[in-house]
Amino acid sequence: EAQVTQNPRYLITVTGKKLTVTCSQNMNHEYMSWYRQDPGLGLRQIYYSMNVEVTDKGDVPEGYKVSRKEKRNFPLILESPSPNQTSLYFCASSPGGRYEAFFGQGTRLTVV
Amino acid sequence: GEDVEQSLFLSVREGDSSVINCTYTDSSSTYLYWYKQEPGAGLQLLTYIFSNMDMKQDQRLTVLLNKKDKHLSLRIADTQTGDSAIYFCAERTANRKLIWGLGTSLAVNP
């Protein structure tokens, strides 16, 4: 089954404790991206990747890092999380970057 | 600047048609998309329309595009309770950026 898998689904952490949210897709898609979803602000893109070793900033990259060492994986790294990064995070992928074709189920992150 | 606007809420009765509207500002848009988000789930691509088309139909879904007015609509025929969700309009601009609306929450009442 074609899917984008994010882990964990829920995470509560403390300020400053480094964390990684994983994202994996099984469709051999070149394009992957990360979004955060906040009430009243909608979906905002954090980072995207057009292919292996090619990443670029989205609209709200501050406080986040990503890597794309393999085609299937696109982890989101928060080196020093802060409460303003409390949000619902989505990973997405597509075959050509023209649109976000498949989304993961989301990761609800709370930073206290 | 680039912006996509949608009304926040829509309530319909089961069996009626739903029409969700969206306006956008960037005239260089190439594709326009409709996504559905059910509670606790990720977004699901419902349909899309190329900017040189006026209409696209896919089973119960009809997308209408008025390029002159920069207006996009999604009509759901015979709306069912399973259609209750948040619907997002998104625009792909010529520089490949994706601009999202804030979403329209559709409530279907029995």
Image (cartoon, coloured by chain):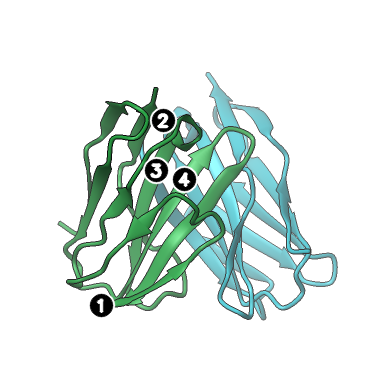
- Label 4 and label 2 in one chain: no
Please, what is the three-letter code of the amino acid marked with disc 1? Val
Q: Which residue is mark 2?
A: B39
Q: Name the amino acid type tagged 4.
A: Arg
Residue pictured at 40% horizontal, 52% vertical: A64
Chain hosting mark 1:
A
Mark 3 or 4, nearer chain start: 4
Left or right: B67, with B11 as reference point? right
Disc 2 residue type (three-letter):
Pro
Q: Quadrant for residue A108, please give it.
A: top left
C-alpha span from label 3 to label 2: 14 Å
In the rendered image, the vertical position of residue B72 relative to residue B27, given as above or below: above
- Structural crowding at the residue carrying mark 1, measured as other residues with C-alpha within 10 Å and reported as few (<14), some (14–19) or many (≥20): some
Crowdedness near tag 3: few (<14), some (14–19) or many (≥20) residues, C-alpha within 10 Å: many
Of tags 3 and 2, which is closer to the observer? 3
Q: Distance from label 4 to label 2 (Cα)?
A: 16 Å
Residue B46 numbered tag: none
